[in-house]
Amino acid sequence: MKEITVRIPEDVLAQLDKEAGLEHISRAQFIRAKLVPTNNKSVGNYGPKDFHNLVSLVRRRTGSGIDKRQLENVVAIVFNELAS
């Protein structure tokens, strides 16, 4: 990897550090990710229990007016779209 030097205002540097800290990555990693974004979207490390909890939450919020199987399909579609 080639090293470069960049001069930026201190307030911008502080904002970069803050955002990198929120993502638990180094400033350099944060800047590289912004300059060369990847197409890999992360939806987190979810398992079957998380999926079930989300389906239950959506079902409660929609007043149980939608069939559980339909909700499971919708949640699965959302997860797939976020990951693609």
Image (cartoon, rainbow, N blue to C red):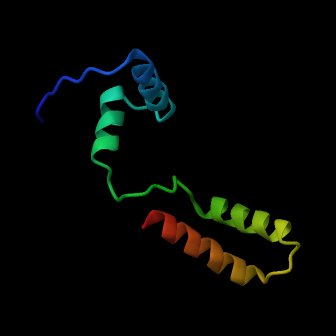
Q: In which quarter of the image is the N terminus?
A: top left
Q: Name the residue nearer the viewer: 9 or 18.
A: 9
* Looking at the image, residue 51 lies above or below residue 76: above
Q: Name the residue nearer the viewer: 50 or 30.
A: 30
- The location of residue 31, given as percent across then percent down, is 32, 35
* Looking at the image, residue 21 lies above or below residue 1: above
Tell me which residue sits at (47%, 27%) in the image.
Answer: 21
Tell me which residue sits at (51%, 57%) in the image.
Answer: 43
- The location of residue 33, given as percent across then percent down, is 33, 42
Image-based side of 15 in relation to 54, left or right: left
- Numbered circles on residues, count: 0
Query: Residue placed farthest to the front in the image?
Result: 9
- The location of residue 7, given as percent across then percent down, is 26, 20
Tell me which residue sits at (50%, 70%) in the image.
Answer: 81
Image-based side of 46 in relation to 10, left or right: right
- The location of residue 60, given as percent across then percent down, is 85, 67
Residue 75: quarter of image: bottom right
Query: Residue placed farthest to the left in the image?
Result: 2
Q: Name the residue nearer the viewer: 3 or 48.
A: 3
Query: Residue placed farthest to the top in the image?
Result: 10
Q: In which quarter of the image is the C terminus?
A: bottom left
